[in-house]
Amino acid sequence: MRRRCIQFKSDALRKFPPRCRYLIAVSGGRDSVSLLHWLVQLGYRKLIVCHLNHQLRGQSSRADARFVEKVAAEYQADFEIGLANVQALAKKQRISIETAAREARYAFFAETARRRNCRTIFVAHHADDLVETFLINLFRGAGSAGLSAMQETSIRRIDRLELTIVRPFLRFWRKDIDEYVGEHGLKFREDATNKNLRPLRNRIRHRIIPYLEKTVGRNIRRNIWRTAIIAAEEEKWMGGELLDLTRAELSVPAIRALPIAFQRRAILKWLRAQNVSNVGFDVIERVRSLADGDTRIAKVNLPENRHARRRAGRIFVE
C-alpha cells in the first residue's frame, strides 16, 4: 500500500513572500524543525532562526541549542540564541513555569526583531495546539476572546514593538507533521517534559482529550478546532470595530459609551497593549469598575504587582 505524500498548503503565507526576511522560532522539536524545513523548501532563504534556552533541563537544554544552531547552519540561515532563567522569573513574578517561559520567549523574539529590524516571526503552532489552548481557556472561564485561542496571523505588542506572528501549521494536525518528519527523514530533539503530567496542557493532551474522544466520539477534536476557528474570525472582526487601544491611557467616557460586551473586549485589548499578562475575567471587571460613574474606587490591582488607576477621566497602568 502506497503511503500518501504530505503536502502542506497555507493561505497564511500569501501576505509573506519568500523574498523577504523573517524570524522563525525553532525549539528543536519536530514541529518547529518541520516548519523550518518546509519554508526552506518553499524558497524562504532569508530566515533568522531564533532559539531561547530556558535553562530548565540543564545539559539537555544546552544540547537543544547546539542542535538548533547546527540545523540553522545546514540551511545557511542566520542564528540567534537567547538565555533566560525561566524558573527564577516564574518565582519572582509568581506565575507558572509555562507562562514564564512564554513571556521570556516573546521578550527574546521582540528584542531580536528590534535589533534585526524584522517584525514578523513564524511559529509552529498546529491544530492540536489550537484545540488544547481552547480547552485551557474554556476551563479558566475565558470569553470568546480567549476561546478564539490562536489565529493564523496576529499582532502581539511587546514593549511598544508590534510583532506579527504567523502560524502556517494551524490547520494541520500533529499526525500530519509526524508523517512529514518520516517522509523527509528529519532529525529533531525530543523534550522529555512533554510527558510530565503536572502542566495543565500535558494533562489535557494525554488524559482529557483521549477521554473525550472515547466517550463523545473521534470527531470531538476537529469540532473543537472548528469552534476555535469560528471564534477567532468573529473576534478579529470585533477587534476591528473597537477604538484605538494602543495608547497608554483609556478614556472613561469612551468606555462607558460601549455595550458591556465591547467594554470587556476593549479593556482586554488595551491591557494586552500595555503588556499586562494573565488577564482574566476578574481583572477585566476590576478595570471596568473604574469606568463606573457610581464608584469611588480609583485604583485596582493587576497581575505582577501592577495597578490600574483612574484620574481626570482617564485610566492608566502603573
Image (spheres, rainbow, N blue to C red):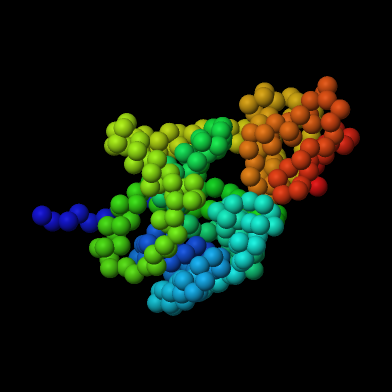
Q: Is residue 242 visible?
A: no
Position of residue 188 measured from the top left corner of the image (x, y, whole percent): 37, 67
Residue 257 image offset from top left, x and y in percent: 74, 24
Considering every residue shown, the one lying at the far left of the view is 1
Q: What residue is shown at x 22% (from left), y 56% (from top)?
A: 5
- The residue at the point 64 percent across, 68 percent down is 115
Question: Which residue appears at 85% of the width and 34% of the height?
Answer: 298
**Residue 81, placed above or below residue 192:** below
- The residue that appears at 70% across and 25% down in the rendered structure is 258
Q: Residue 303 lies in what quarter of the image?
A: top right
Q: Quadrant of the N terminus?
A: bottom left
Location of residue 109 (image quadrant): bottom right
Q: x%, y% of residue 156?
A: 60, 50
Left or right relative to 24: residue 307: right
Residues 171 and 43: in front is 171
From the viewer's perspective, tell me whether residue 260 is left or right of residue 190: right
Quarter of the image where one finds residue 70? bottom left
Observer-nearest of 317 and 111:
317
Residue 248 placement (x, y as % from top left)? 77, 45
Q: Nearer the viewer, residue 10 or 15?
A: 10
Above or below — where is 38 with respect to 148? below
The image shows residue 75, relative to residue 144, as above or below, that is below
In the image: residue 277, left or right of residue 150: right
Q: Does residue 216 appear in this view?
A: yes
Q: Is residue 110 above or below residue 241?
A: below
